Image: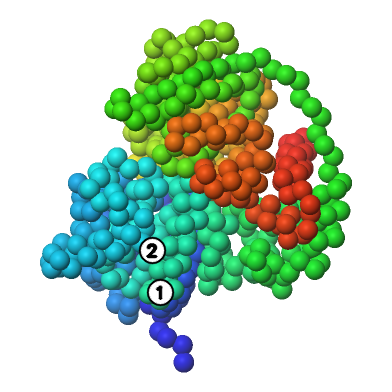
Amino acid sequence: MRQKPIIEFIDYSFQYFSQAEPTLEDINLKIYPGEKILIVGPSGSGKSTLGHCINGLIPFAYEGEIKGTLKIKDLIAKEQDIFLLSKIVGTVLQDSDGQFVGLTVGEDIAFALENDNVNIHKMHDTVRKVAEMVDMDKLLKSSPFELSGGQKQRTSLAGVMVDDVDVLLFDEPLANLDPATGKTAIEIIDDIHKRTNKTVLIIEHRLEDVLHRDVDRIIVIADGRIIADMTPDELVSSSILFENGIREPLYITALKYAGINVHKDMHPSHLDTLKMDTVIQPLTSWYKRIEKPQKQDEKPNILKVENLTFSYDGKRNILDDVTFDIYEGDMISIVGKNGAGKSTLAKVLCGFENQDLGNIYYYSENIKDKSIKERAEIIGLVMQNPNQMISKSLIYDEIALGLRLRNVPEEEIKERVEKVLEVCGLSPFIDWPISALSYGQKKRVTIASILVLEPKIIILDEPTAGQDYHHYTEIMKFLEKINKMGVTIIMITHDMHLMLEYTPRAIVLLDGKVIADTKASIVLTDTDLVSKANLKETSLYYLAEKAKIEDGTLFVQRFIDYEKGVRETNED
């Protein structure tokens, strides 16, 4: 006899008081004890709102009208209080900064135990054990706000794990993590699930990364409704992901390009389980047919970074003798693990920080002494955290701000803002307050506010964080379009799909040093480089290995070339 559900939605709808339409509508869903569930959907689909209903933020923090019933452990959720629900459901938030309460990592992890008056010796022992599990035991005395994005995420995870809750809810746990740390996070979550048999819910865009470990079911939400509740094999074999703007695993895309009919009996949700007998021949034939692209003409050097060294404290170099060239019209990625110096490099290039040694040349002009305002005319920066860039209440005013500061006529501002809003998928929200947006939507506002200024070089720090595949593709299409017009684009990213698909070249940083400057296909197929830089080999490389294709790097490169041709054909 099957257990009673631990979470049950019955004809459930929810509408924020500030919204004209329900965010969730007619939700019927049962989640059973010990299940591991992945919840996916486009930005604004309602998946985070669903999570807020489960952990009690709705209705106790975010008010609105509820119809139907939500039961958590047989309790009617709306009749409880948020404290009681927090003892059943523990949440790791997408925005780690919003979850910190302690002055140190150790204090933050211990917060729930302190609230429960746990014995001090037991508390220290529990905190140490949990910190070791998430590899934060050596940073217990550090301030949470001095940590990298990945370290913050690990601290938040530990803070939830110390409390013996029944349900663990992860809201986009991979959003700020480098590829290898993200892989480890999924392994940690899986390990916790297997050892404790707790119910685990993961809300995440990065489907392929979550499927690094098994999940029982995948719930797909679109426009506030559940449109699919399937096993991973069933879902990746269907057209549901593509139709709803969710990125399918990259190796599945390669199989489809090769004309292979992907079906659930092939067990395609994992490369380890994928039946290769019907795959090898068509995949090899397709790979051999792909034509080598024509060699590009050499372009002038637009940005030259020479022996750049920088330290915040004068003791430890965050950037150490960094040298590279960026050519006019380049579209490149800067990659590396959390804390490698990527974001600091962007700050130095834009003049937010002054280098200790070295030079930066724009064409042949040394710009190291130029002010932030002067550099902003040629280099635009979209920061990783949208909350650090936003200063206006309304979306339109935020995007128009830079143009108004430059005294652009209001009529031209309106035209340029509306164009960028459309490209970034924000047109329906033109009159909205920014406070009503999701984290991913805020990210698109900050990208739009820089794109509207039309700088010569754009640096984007994690441009795809929090983006669904549909809006990610729209933004990247726009970036490709302006790139073809000669705008140079530098992307700091943990998204290895983005690096492979859109940037032919990648610069790899480790501990402030450049350890590679080469093709993206080489970066993700060089085992030593992948290990050093905390990256993750692409699933395309493993697919080539399983298909017994001799040159896995060439297979990856040809996939990139083929996909670029597909994009250009579709645009035509």
Q: In which quarter of the image is residue 397?
A: top left
Asked whether disc 1 touches disc 2, contact meaning CB atoms under 8 Å apart, the reply is: no
**Residue that badge 2 annotates:** 169
**Which residue sits at x=74%, y=55%?**
544
Which of these two is toward me, 272 or 289?
Answer: 272
- Residue closest to the eye, 501 or 342: 342
Q: Earlier in the sequence, mark 1 or mark 2?
A: 2
Element under disc 1: helix
Crowd class of label 2 (few under 14; some 14 to 19; many from 20; radius 10 Å): many
Numbered marks: total = 2
Residue 1: x and y, percent?
A: 46, 92
Q: In this view, does 20 lie to the left or right of 286?
A: left
Q: Can residue 20 be seen from the camera position used here?
A: yes
Position of the C terminus by quadrant:
top right
Q: Name the residue under label 1.
A: 195
Residue kind at label 2, given as amino acid type: Leu
What amino acid is found at the position of numbered circle 1 in the picture?
Arg
Measure the C-alpha gap from mark 1 to mark 2: 17 Å
Expressed as whole percent of the image width and height from the top left, the position of residue 218 reads: 54, 66
